[in-house]
Image (tube, helix red, strand yellow):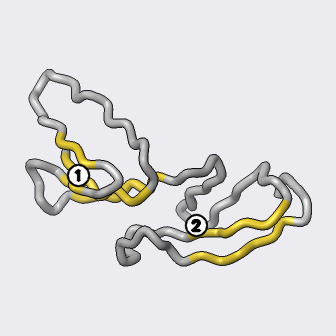
Amino acid sequence: MYSFSAAKRFELPLYVGTPAEPVVFDRPGIVTIGCNIHDWMIGDIYVAETPYFARSGGDGHARQDNLPAGRDVLRVRHPRMELSEEAPSRPVSLERAGL
């Protein structure tokens, strides 16, 4: 497994019976990973600088509980979107906490 992404560059050699060292994602951004053996196997990891995030379920819905009241920006990311550090966003305002 490897990544040449700006947010995290790494290469994990894969040997049978030898566990790989953990990779720490300590910078925000999109990390595209690839497989050393199968070129067609790729994936994206989105590293966010926030404790507030949600992942959609099979039905396409996502829910975020315990949000603080106030104004912020909602950003959306999907693997089929063009890779960009700037995902589509929308200003949001929460009148009360916990929504």
Q: Quadrant of the C terminus?
A: bottom right
Residue matched to label 2: 59
Q: Secondary structure at mark 2?
A: loop
Question: Of callouts 1 and 2, which one flags the residue occurring earlier in the amino acid sequence?
Answer: 1
- The quarter holding residue 62 reads bottom right
The percent coordinates of residue 10 (x first, y second) are: 22, 44
Specify whether 23 is left or right of 77: left
CA gap between label 1 and label 2 equals 30 Å
Query: Residue at the spot x=27%, y=57% of the render?
Result: 5
Q: Quadrant of the N terminus?
A: top left
Callout 1 crowding tier (Cα within 10 Å): few <14, some 14–19, many ≥20: some
Query: Residue at the spot x=39%, y=43% of the render?
Result: 25
Residue matched to label 1: 3
Q: Is residue 61 above or below residue 50?
A: below
- The quarter holding residue 26 reads top left
The percent coordinates of residue 45 (x first, y second) are: 39, 54
Q: Is residue 6 above or below residue 71?
A: above
The percent coordinates of residue 2 (x first, y second) are: 19, 48
Name the outermost residue toward the right.
Answer: 96
Query: Residue at the spot x=17%, y=42% of the render?
Result: 11
Q: Amino acid at mark 1?
A: Ser
Q: Secondary structure at mark 1?
A: strand
Name the outermost residue toward the top.
Answer: 17
Query: Residue at the spot x=85%, y=58% of the render?
Result: 69
Camera-near label (1 vs 2) is 1
The percent coordinates of residue 46 (x first, y second) are: 44, 56
- The quarter holding residue 60 reads bottom right
